[in-house]
Image (cartoon, rainbow, N blue to C red):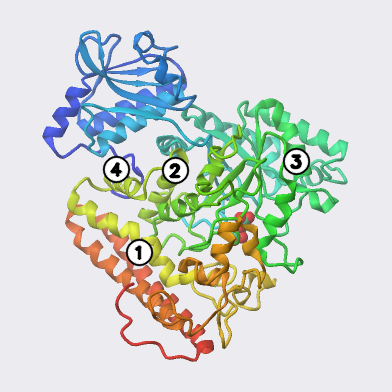
Amino acid sequence: YAEDGYRLWLRYDKLADPAKVAAYRNAVSQIVLDGQSETIQVAREELTLGLKGLLGTDVSFVNQATKEGTLIVGTPSTSKLIASLNLKNQLATIGNEGFIIQRTKVGTTQNIVIAANTDVGVLYGVFHFLRLIQTHQDISAVNSVNTPKINHRILNHWDNLNRTVERGYAGASLWDWHKLPDYTSPRYKDYARANASVGINGTVLTNVNANALILTPQYLEKVAALANIFRPYGIRVYLTARFSAPVEMGGLKTADPLDPQVIAWWKQKTEEIYTYVPDFGGFLVKANSEGQPGPQNYGRTHADGANMLADAVGPKGGIVMWRAFVYDNKIPDDRAKQAYTEFKPLDGTFRKNVLVQVKNGAVDFQPREPFHPLFGAMPKTPMMMEFQITQEYLGFATHMVFLASLFKETLYADTYAKGKGSEVAKVIDRSLDKHELTGIAGVANIGDERNWCGHPFGQANWYAFGRLAWDHTLSEDQIADEWLRMTFSNDNRFLKPVKEMMLASRETLVNYMTPLGLHHIMGYNHHYGPGPWVNQASRPDWNSVYYHKADSIGVGFDRTTKGSDAVSQYFPPVRDMFNSTQTCPEKFLLWFHHVPWDYKTQSGRILWDELCYRYYGGAKSVQQMQQTWNTIQPMIDAERFVHVKDLLKVQEKEARWWRDACVLYFQSFSKRPIPSDLEKPP
Ligand code: GCU
């Protein structure tokens, strides 16, 4: 392999330390893995590949645990050995996808067991076990009971059928529609392996803005070919449903969700999809948003639209993920309020198999946003989180930013929906409202570039999304640590500085792009680079000036009870906290308040000086990232070292670009000097 990142975090290079290799070989001297399913077969393949790579030896598969150090893998229904062990009580707690990895006595010998209730649970256990070795964990007393906290863990590909990827920065779409179904790239399997290794169990193949062509038989045949490859890995395929498809494809005069012909059309279409993909997961829908068609075109509600599709897929076990990313420039209200205004009254009117999919914040995947007020506000409806893994507003695939920090910040924000301790994570993992369905989606950053994500560190965000979707209690530190060990090196001299750099990277980016609650001040349309001056966009709510409202007095959007009153969409303790500059966290200050330039911030500096301090500090931090990266050169391969080094050069240049553009632009309002002595990072 060239060291180009193709293998992602599944590198399986031989461990450097002979003592470790010997210890692991003793712990796994042979394997009993019963079962015949395709999933068990891929689990066997992965174990073979992984152990051979990591330990440099072929570990043989046998029928009996004849000696110490036998790895025993399977489910009680496929393996007599597993069934004979005393695992019943534990297995009863881990559901369909969980697994147990345990060192246990079998007969007279000590062995490691990977047990689950289902074959896919076994596969997840196998990946986890390999990860323990890859990250040099001590397995001599391993005892891990591991269950996902969220059921639907899904990637959303914004891939078009012409292979362009909306907001994708890592090449063309992976899906080679032209050659499918007959030619299936081996890469599809590697994609499935990577997802399964972190527990991602669904993929929406098409863009939320895609046309309806994907629903035609010639494309469904291609979809089926992909689904067949993903199935053994526990991954179900979903599609986007263009709401006007009955008109565009079906020749009907209307797409009104209450029209009997429309209902019949979707029912029939859905049945057809299930003939191609018997375990089809369901639909993701963007409706009445940014010009897309939807039920409101016919005077119906989002619930009418979602329920009609839900009734079509329901009998086959499918779900509908209905997006709440709606706003309309014809509505004069603050854009940040519109989704809540439209959706909250619909709580309790959706079918059981509908999830409402809500972006993490109320505007649009900014470097930092307060959590979306819909979380906690619709207790009768399962709410699904939508994160963006692709870096649309975060420097595309050229800036290094570790998004676990952003994901965790949102997931652990307290909504106060049911009093203190009602974190967003509890809304989506059902611990608050006990819904049957739970889900989390990430807009993928994957393309056909050799290293999948463009930036070698972009892979960490795919990894982090999957790990947090499985278990949101994992810390950023642990996720970064695992990923670095698997992807680069277990050497502490590498790990420590690079992990620190990753963990600080999101705050650094916020500082040089949108500090103190600024948002949506990027270049028009392409969303790359600074553009606080944008005021001529095709609609006012795409202008930067709409959001920062800079004037001679100050800067920021007044969303308090005296302003747009967006604060009142939050539960009272949160509303009150955001409503006052005294209690509003400074990181959200300009999101909620129009603040005078001479306002005293927590540091003692006036707002203008603090803003400059952040911009300069952020840019300075990128120079420090460069210095850190230079120190680890001897510890990794030259190819990835140079790749990251060069991208950091771009990032450093562009951090200065953001700094200079924003500081000079806002200075034309503040009319204040740029303070001297700004070269220290915050
Ligand atoms: C953003 C993004 C669009 C995308 C939209 C969505 O506005 O720029 O490209 O279609 O979000 O999430 O629907």
Local SS, label 2: loop
- Kindly identify which residue carries mark 4: 486
Do tag 3 and tag 2 residues touch (Cβ < 8 Å)?
no
Query: Disc 1 or disc 4, which is closer to the eye?
Result: 4
Disc 1 and disc 2: Cα gap in Å?
30 Å
Query: Disc 4 or disc 2, which is closer to the eye?
Result: 2
Query: Disc 3 or disc 1, which is closer to the eye?
Result: 3
Hey, what amino acid is under mark 4?
A: Met
In the rendered structure, find residue 506 and report the number of the disc placed on it: none
Question: As displayed, is residue 178 above or below residue 339?
Answer: above
Q: Quadrant of residue 272?
A: top right
Q: Going by the picture, which residue comes out furthest to the left?
A: 19
Tell me: 637 left or right of 606: left
Is there any visible trace of residue 654 in the rendered image?
Answer: yes
Disc 4 and disc 2: Cα gap in Å?
20 Å
Question: As displayed, is residue 456 above or below residue 249?
Answer: below
Estimate the x, y position of residue 198 in percent, counting from the top left: 41, 38
Local SS, label 3: loop
Local SS, label 4: helix
Name the N-terminal-most of marks 4 and 2: 2
**Numbered disc total:** 4
- Kindly identify which residue carries mark 3: 349
Name the N-terminal-most of marks 3 and 1: 3
- Kindly identify which residue carries mark 1: 647
Hey, what amino acid is under mark 3?
A: Thr
Is there any visible trace of residue 364 in the rendered image?
Answer: no
- Kindly identify which residue carries mark 2: 472
Name the N-terminal-most of marks 1 and 4: 4
